[in-house]
Amino acid sequence: MSRMGPAFERSKLGGLIFLFGLFLALFPPGGLMGPEAAASESLRATLSWAIPGALGLFIAASGAPIYYVSNLPRLILGWILSLYSLSVMIVEWNPNTGMLATTVSSAAGVLVTVLIYLYSIRLTESMGQGDGVTKPLEDDEIEHVSKILLANLDEGGLQ
């Protein structure tokens, strides 16, 4: 996401543009209309629990046992942040019964779509038989590839 432009001339400005856009969404310059103001307020309310939650999950995952060795302080801190995030989310959650059915059906649709997508990937990968082991290059092919590589390395100034 933070890389923009053709593959050989990428710019690192993508991340800065994303942060600038996020900053404008969180702290708009003023004069927003009803729906935009509601979206900005909703984003701010969501980030109040989403940032500690994501940070807590990351810290807990980094402190989780690897080869039966865990980092207990990290694990505890991660779970504390995650539980704090969960408590803030529950306190701020104001369910609208009119939108509850729409939300549940939308979430079910997304879940079904993801499951179908994952199943199709699994099915597609299981169908491929593969070509087996490829034959080694012949002498003239090795010479040809070597010439190409040496010419490209020489042009790039790597020699």
Image (cartoon, grey):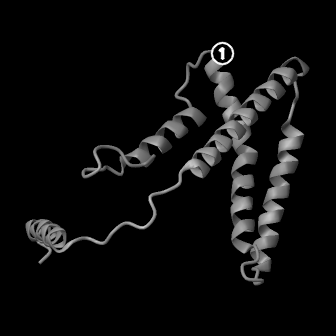
Residue 85 position in % (x across, y down): 80, 51
- Left or right: residue 57 versus residue 159 is right
Residue in view at x 25 percent, y 70 percent: 137
Q: Looking at the picture, does residue 7 appear above or below residue 135?
A: above
Residue 144 position in % (x across, y down): 13, 67
Q: Which residue is mark 1?
A: 34
Q: Is residue 27 visible?
A: no
Front-most of residues 25 and 74 = 74
Residue 143 position in % (x across, y down): 13, 72
Q: Residues within 10 Å of mark 1 (few under 14, many from 20)?
A: few
Residue 78 position in % (x across, y down): 77, 65
Front-most of residues 50 and 40 = 50
- Left or right: residue 91 versus residue 150 is right
Residue in view at x 79 percent, y 60 percent: 81
Residue in view at x 49 percent, y 44 percent: 19
- Left or right: residue 21 versus residue 70 is left
Q: Is residue 135 visible?
A: yes
Residue 152, image quadrant: bottom left
- Considering the image in quadrants, where does the C terminus appear? bottom left
Q: Amino acid at mark 1?
A: Gly
Residue in view at x 72 percent, y 40 percent: 115
Front-most of residues 85 and 75 = 75
In the structure shown, which secondary structural element does the residue marked by tag 1 occupy?
helix
Front-most of residues 109 and 139 = 139
